Image (spheres, rainbow, N blue to C red):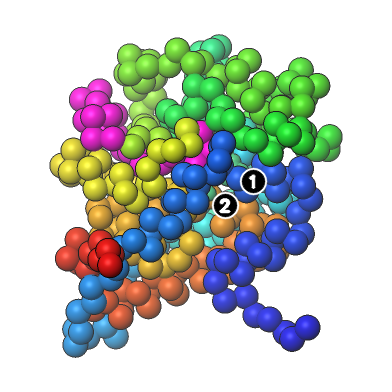
Amino acid sequence: SAFKKIANIQDIEDAALKKLDRNVLDYYGPGAQDNITNKDNKLAYDRYQLCPRVLRDVSNVDMSVSIFGHTFKTPVFVAASAMQKMANPIGEAGAARSACKNGAGYSLSTVSTTSLEDISKSVAPLESQGHQSVRWFQLYVYKDRLKSLDLIKRAENAGFTALLVTADTPYLGRRLANIRHGFMLPDHLRLANFDKGEGDSAKKDSNYISKYISDQIDPSLSWKDLKWLKTQTKLPILVKGVLTAEDAKLVVENGLDGIVVSNHGGRQLDGVSATIDALDEVVQAVDNKIPVLIDGGVMRGSDVFKALALGAKAVFVGRPVLWSLALDGEKGVDLMFDILNEELRLTMALSGVSNVSQIDKSYIKPLATR
Ligand code: FNR
């Protein structure tokens, strides 16, 4: 067949789908239940059109953003997703290193196959070359609170500078492919933030992750627990998984520091709205008091632009990172950043904006229904 150059994130996904086996694809790809929300996360971006301005000198485009006192070179961040060594042996470290080189935000899952400490080690050589690594830790709150407190201490000591507390997973969503075929973490991999054997009792169960979550994660978690968590660390706490104005206000009222508008990539409650459609009400409710970020379905620079136009400070990508790791490890993620950053730069330039602070609602409109 003719030589084909990878040109966009869909090309990366297509290539990755050919490389990964069913056990891994079943876990990485689908949303919960009928995959409606997962699909809509992407489709919803197409329901907004761009409203470019012309003749505005776009010879220099600055994509940098600032959050919690850190300046990032791009608003495209790496989402926390579990068990990345199933995509490529370099796993989470490949994405962390690539984010660091690109001046992008990075987040690590609690249930990663690389430990917090090893992530810090993996970026240390880049930091000594002058690159800045800003890494955040995604926290699941365990029934055993000491376990979560220990993770927070370790995150602080390993140079992580914010916590993302996942609020949408008191139980795992029903992921049908995993129920039908069973899912197993391959034997040579483990949940690296914990002692050997963590999750092993769940390994006997064909629905490994679901069993692990229901054994370990606390479904009684509520706002009072987040208030308590706030007293246990100096790190800013972002609540990940907010979809409504009501909850957005509670995040502010409870003294928490940020929001990620997320539906967990459609993997939890199927049938909720696409995140881009929930963003506006959350941003309005928060009224600039704390930063609002978003994830879900971002595949192109123009998607990032639309999220920024609706008030997101930055955008996380989840599956695109996994597909990029599967394609070519750290180099794959470098390619992902090259593509998304170039697409965003070009969308900004062709829309007539030369820095991120200029991007507002006037640059998009809902697609007209015909
Ligand atoms: C996730 N996500 C996730 N979120 C979280 O808080 N803790 C976790 O361990 C995981 N694990 C995980 C595994 C896999 C395979 C995926 C695809 C996702 C959700 C993730 O942080 C993010 O919300 C979504 O991935 C964003 O949607 P896209 O970019 O994948 O469409």
Secondary structure of the residue carrying tag 1 is helix
Q: Position of residue 251 (x, y in %)?
A: 27, 29
Q: Which residue is mark 1?
A: 28
Q: Foreground: 280 or 252? A: 280
Q: What are the residue bounds of the magenta stretch?
A: 244-268
Q: Is the CB of mark 2 within 8 Å of ligand 1?
A: yes
Q: What residue is drawn where x is 25% and y is 41%? A: 282
Q: What residue is drawn where x is 63% and y is 15%? A: 215
Query: Would residue 154 be visible to someone looking at this image?
Result: no
Query: Would residue 236 be visible to someone looking at this image?
Result: yes
**Residue 180 appears left or right of 161:** right
Disc 1 residue type (three-letter): Tyr
Q: Foreground: 1 or 193? A: 1
Mark number displayed over residue 212: none
Secondary structure of the residue carrying tag 2 is helix
State how many labels appear.
2
150 in relation to 38, above or below: above
Residue 318 in magenta stretch: no
Q: Which residue is mark 2?
A: 319
Q: Is the CB of mark 1 within 8 Å of ligand 1?
A: yes
346 in relation to 240, above or below: below
Q: What residue is drawn where x is 66% and y is 65%? A: 14
Which of pointers 2 and 1 lies earlier in the amino acid sequence? 1
The C terminus sits in image quarter: bottom left
211 in relation to 78, above or below: above
Assess disc 1: are there few (<14), some (14-19) or many (≥20) residues with their C-alpha within 10 Å of its C-alpha. Answer: many
Say if mark 2 contacts mark 1, CB within 8 Å.
Answer: yes
Q: Position of residue 105 (x, y in %)?
A: 45, 52
